[in-house]
C-alpha cells in the first residue's frame, strides 16, 4: 500500500519566536566572548582591542536603532548615533594604526 507524501509542517508564530529567541541568545554569547577578547587583547598590548571594542559599540548602536524603530523615541536614535560614531572611530583607528 502506497503511503501519502509526508506534508511539511507550516511555520507558525511559535517557530518564529523560537528563531528570534535563539538569535538573541546567540548574540548575548557573542557579545560576552567579544568582551573577553577585548580585555585579553588590551592586557597583552595587542592593538586588536580597538577593533573588538568597536564591534561592541556597533552592537549597542544597532540595538538602540531597533528600539527607536519600535518605540519611535528620539533619544534611542540620538544615543545610537553617538555609539555608532564611536564604533566607526575605533574601527578606523584600528585600521589605520593596526
Image (tube, grey):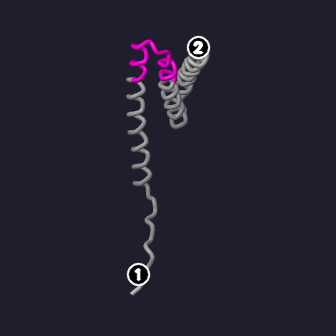
Instruction: Tell me if 66 is positioned left or right of 24 in this view.
Output: right
Q: CA distance from mark 1 to mark 2?
A: 66 Å
Up the image or down, 55 lies above or below 7; here it is above
Quadrant (top left, top right, bottom left, bottom right) of the N terminus: bottom left
Q: State the predominant SS element of the stretch in magenta.
A: helix
Residue at the farthest bottom position: 1
Question: Does the residue at mark 1 contact the one at mark 2 (Cβ under 8 Å)?
Answer: no
92 inside magenta stretch: no
Residue on which the image places disc 2:
97
Of tags 1 and 2, the one toward the viewer is 2
Of the residues under marks 1 and 2, which one precedes in the sequence?
Answer: 1
Q: Which residue occupies 42% across, 27% down?
A: 34
- Please tell me which residue lies in front, 48 or 75: 48
Tell me which segment is drawn in magenta. Answer: 37-54
Q: Position of residue 81 (x, y in %)?
A: 57, 23
Give the residue drawn at x 44%, y 12%: 45
* Residue 19 location (% of width, % of height): 43, 48
Instruction: Locate the C terminus and report the quarter of the image it occupies.
Output: top right
Q: For residue 3, which numbered disc appears in the image?
A: 1
Q: Quadrant of residue 7?
A: bottom left
The tag on residue 23 is none
* Number of dots carrying numbers: 2
SS for callout 1: loop
Amino acid at each position: 500500500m502506497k503511503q501519502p507524501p509526508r506534508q511539511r509542517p507550516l511555520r507558525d508564530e511559535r517557530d518564529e519566536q523560537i528563531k528570534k529567541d535563539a538569535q538573541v541568545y546567540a548574540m548575548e554569547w557573542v557579545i560576552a566572548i567579544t568582551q573577553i577578547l577585548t580585555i585579553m587583547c588590551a592586557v597583552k598590548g595587542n592593538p586588536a582591542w580597538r577593533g573588538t571594542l568597536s564591534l561592541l559599540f556597533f552592537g549597542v548602536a544597532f540595538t538602540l536603532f531597533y528600539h527607536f524603530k519600535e518605540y519611535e523615541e528620539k533619544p534611542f536614535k540620538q544615543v545610537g548615533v553617538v555609539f555608532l560614531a564611536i564604533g566607526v572611530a575605533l574601527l578606523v583607528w584600528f585600521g589605520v594604526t593596526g
